[in-house]
Amino acid sequence: MMFSSQNSNIKFGLSVIASALLFSSLQGCSSTDEQTQASVKSNKGLGSWVSVNQQQNHQSIDEEKLWQSAYKRKQQLADLYQQILTATPDNQVVEDIRYRLAELYTYQVEQAQGDELVASDLEDNSVADSAQNSDEMLRSNIDRFKELLASYPNNSNNPKIYYQLAKSYSLLGETLLSLQTLEKLAELYPTSTYLEEVYFRIGDIYFSHNNYPRARDALTKALAVGQGKYQNNALYMLAWSQFKLSDYQNASQHFIKLIAQSGEVAKLKQGSASSMISDAERALILLLSQQETDQQETVQQETGQQQTATEQQTESPLVALIEQAQQQGLDTTELEPILYQKLAQFWLTKDLKNEALATYLTYIERKPDNFAAAEFLLEVIGLYPENSTKAFAYKVKFVEDYFVGTNAWNKFTDQQQQQILANLSQFSLLKARQLYATAQDTDYDLEEDESAAYRIAAIWFEKYLYSQQMLAELNLTTDEQQTFIQQLMLAAQARYIASDYVASIEHYQKLVELQPGSADSLYSLIIVYQQALKQQSPSVQPQQKFTELQLSNYWQDFISLYPADRRALYMARQLADYAYAQQDLVSLISQQQFIIQHLDGKIKDKQQATLLVANLQYQLKQYVESEQSYQQALLYIDKHSQKDLYKQTQNLVAASVYFYAQSLLELKPQQAASQFLKVADFVFSNEYTQNALTQAADILMEQADKTQGVAVLKRISKQYPNSDYAKAVPAKLAKVYTDQQEWTLAAKQLELIAKNTNTKQPEGYELARQAQYTAAEYYAKDKDMEAARLALRTYAHNYPKPFDMAQEVRLKMAEFYTEPRDLNKKYFWYRKIVQFHKKEASLHSAQAQQRSEYLASFAAFELAKAHHQTFGRVKLVVPLQQSMAKKQQAMKDAIYYYQQVLDFSLVDFVPQANFHLAELYRTLAREIMQSERPAELDELALEEYELILEEIAYPFEEKAIELHQVNLARTWTNQYDEWIAQSLDKLAALVPAQYKRSLIEVDIYEELN
């Protein structure tokens, strides 16, 4: 009876829980029906079926179930609702719950479909089963929805049920039933919130079945009922429906509306718009091209003549479309140039250049001040041959329409202005050159006409110069700067010919500024200034007056800057006359001295004479004398204006000393070395320095005292690090330092050899390897163990061959680390020894294998001992499971390396490894039995705990005995050492009855003898 009573309570309890969930837990899953909530709150539903006491008796339900996943909670609710249906007679509650169940089952179907999709993506073998389950669930839901609609035709939730029914049909692929359901939903509930999507889905279905008229009608209704999330999709599908119906005008209007209101116009320009918008744009361009083609064909039929796109008089379809869109309130400011660009590009892909030109020119005419018009004009220019008349005319138009200061220019952003500066500069220069050439080639009857022609050319040159000056702020290239200077000179000349002296002088002043080393620019400025001064009207304002004082300053500048220029004598004479007229005696004396110097030709004569003597001495191999003469000649050569001659003479000075040193090599090598070093020590660079240093080094390295030779070698390495000789310097220095027993210095040079040697070739590899190893040895000789370690470490990482040597180096690396803090580094190299032995030892000679096996056994044993020590440091404490895990990990690591030793099978290591491995198990068994006991155990529990510990420890003790027995068994193969003896001791302690030491030792002795 107790069980039956409990079952009864559980039944009532489930009803109570369901009622509670209706009020609270459903909020965590999804919203409940308002009618159901009202029913429960008024005690007309489930609450009237149970008493308060019964509810309290069942509040102990595990609250954690309320926090399960959404899917499980909904599944749980569905089960509860099913129980409630059988427990309540209230029809309203039953109706509410059935609708709620429909919602929950819909959720389960959606979850199942999600699992099906994941299984499909993962190529899960269960995808077929999942799909079948999903279909079955969908069909169950369809039956449930149809039953609800039949049972409760007036329920306010029926729009949603129709929607889910249509969706379920669609998911099952029953499109016709889905369509019928959607149309019924639209008919029965014309104000439903689903209406926009319903019409969209209807239109989508008709479109997929090629019923474009009905698709058009449905999609039009979808657009009419609201501004929901399906508006853009509906617009897109409507436009395509109209496209399919050849209603190109309306299709175009809907495509452009879709694009304009999508918010993706900027992305469309960047090429990053969504696929729908990109597709709409392509369709729109195709429509526009078709309409333009049809328009041209109509005109041809009416006129009987072929009319090119650029000759069209009728309004462009794109223009009409843009104007219609604007009348509808659409903002096409950003979209319009994009469409023109796309349409023009479309024509170009079809090799219809005239249509593309017409498209660009239409926009330019409509929006001449927009930056896109400037870009399109550049596109137009690019469609004509480079030197064609049309291209030239449009380039001129470009400058006239968009030059600095025009209305269009002032509307452009700074970035846009910078973008077209180069074009403005280039095109204005073309026009300027054309005008200048025309002016030069034309014979004018009137001087005024000639002046006017050059003035116009100058104006266009100045446009170029102005744009170039703006570009200069953006860092012109050297070639661009040179072009600027050339055109500035032409502008100055044009202004001079046109008698516009002020402008000409300004240009020449700019030339002097830009060409600080150009005597011609300053000379031209002086000529123009003189002409301006000569023709100056007496009535000119003082501030605009040309003066002789300014002219005299120009003369003085020329003389100071270009004293060797032949025109400087003319300037000096003019300046002397002016100084005389002004009674400026100081200036007069200075100019006369300058004139005398240049008239008597002393400097020039001295220069020529000195160079002549020096050259003759050089030819006669009188190198000491020729050096002195060339040094003297340098005093008369201007190293700025005669730069090449000056440099040539300096090289001849060096050559004289160099060949003098060569003449001393055989008899006086020490003096020869001094002369070679003299060549290298000249303050000026020369072509003999490198050879002089190398020859000096060769001589000095033959001397007993190599100190100076070493210094020269270092100098060569520093000054000419990439020379062939410099590459040999480390070897030379290493030999010197080795002979001098300067081990550290020698080691550094050997490391350089190793570093700089190409190791891809066998010879280079061997040289670098030996150098690196010897460097480590040399550091060790100097007691610099840290440097030795680093050098040897480099060897260990870089030179894995020969194998036996590499293994020995790894052992040496391990031996470097003796401090406790460095043990991990020691173990690193031990692991490397084991690793390389297992990987490569079998590929080498028997001797190499034998030595490597010994090293690997030693390293593995050391690693095993290290892990054994770690094992020993881990204490077994409560909770035993955690500390046991740590100890077993250490034990596992130790066993791994002991097993490696056993696998290598060297008699020197196997017995002791076997012994330690056995002791590892024995220690674990002992420490398990000695481990800390939980404090809360009573006597009986403690006794049970002890038994459990014995059961845990027993296999380990048995394993220890087994391993000691294996060690002891080696006596039968004539092996016996201290480790086998210790195994015997341990067995005597563990199994005294079987392994009494005295008897076993007698057996062993007899066996060994």
Image (spheres, grey):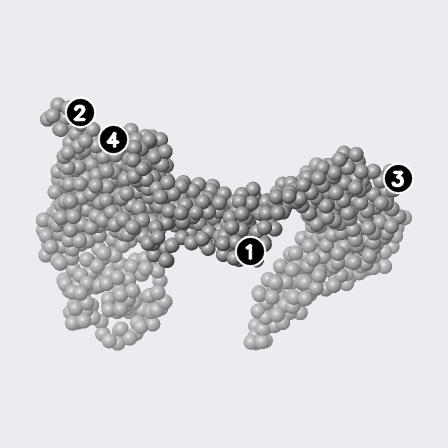
Q: Mark 2 sits on what residue?
A: 306
What kind of element bears circle 2? loop
Mark 2 or mark 4, which has the lower sequence index?
2
- Marks 2/1 in contact by CB < 8 Å: the verdict is no
Label 3 or label 2, whichever lies nearer to me, is 3
- Determine which of the numbered discs, if any, sits on residue 667 in the image: 3
What kind of element bears circle 4? helix
Task: Tell me the distance, in whole angstroms, between the alpha carbons under discs 3 and 2.
Answer: 100 Å
What percent of the width, then of the height, locates residue 617? 77, 37
What percent of the width, then of the height, locates residue 996? 81, 60
- Marks 4/1 in contact by CB < 8 Å: the verdict is no
How crowded is the residue under tag 4: few (<14 C-alpha within 10 Å), some, or many (20+)? some
Q: Which amino acid type corresponds to the residue marked 4 in the rendered image?
A: Asn
Q: Which amino acid type corresponds to the residue marked 3 in the rendered image?
A: Leu
- Marks 3/4 in contact by CB < 8 Å: the verdict is no
What kind of element bears circle 1? helix
Task: Tell me the distance, in whole angstroms, between the alpha carbons under discs 3 and 1.
Answer: 60 Å
Determine the residue positioned at 45% across, 53% down. 548
Mark 3 or mark 1, which has the lower sequence index?
1
Determine the residue positioned at 13% across, 48% down. 327
Mark 3 or mark 4, which has the lower sequence index?
4
- Marks 3/1 in contact by CB < 8 Å: the verdict is no
Q: Mark 1 sits on what residue?
A: 587
Q: In the depicted view, which residue is nearer to us: 46 or 454?
A: 454
Residue 110 appears left or right of 562: left
Q: In the depicted view, which residue is nearer to us: 97 or 732?
A: 732
Mark 3 or mark 2, which has the lower sequence index?
2
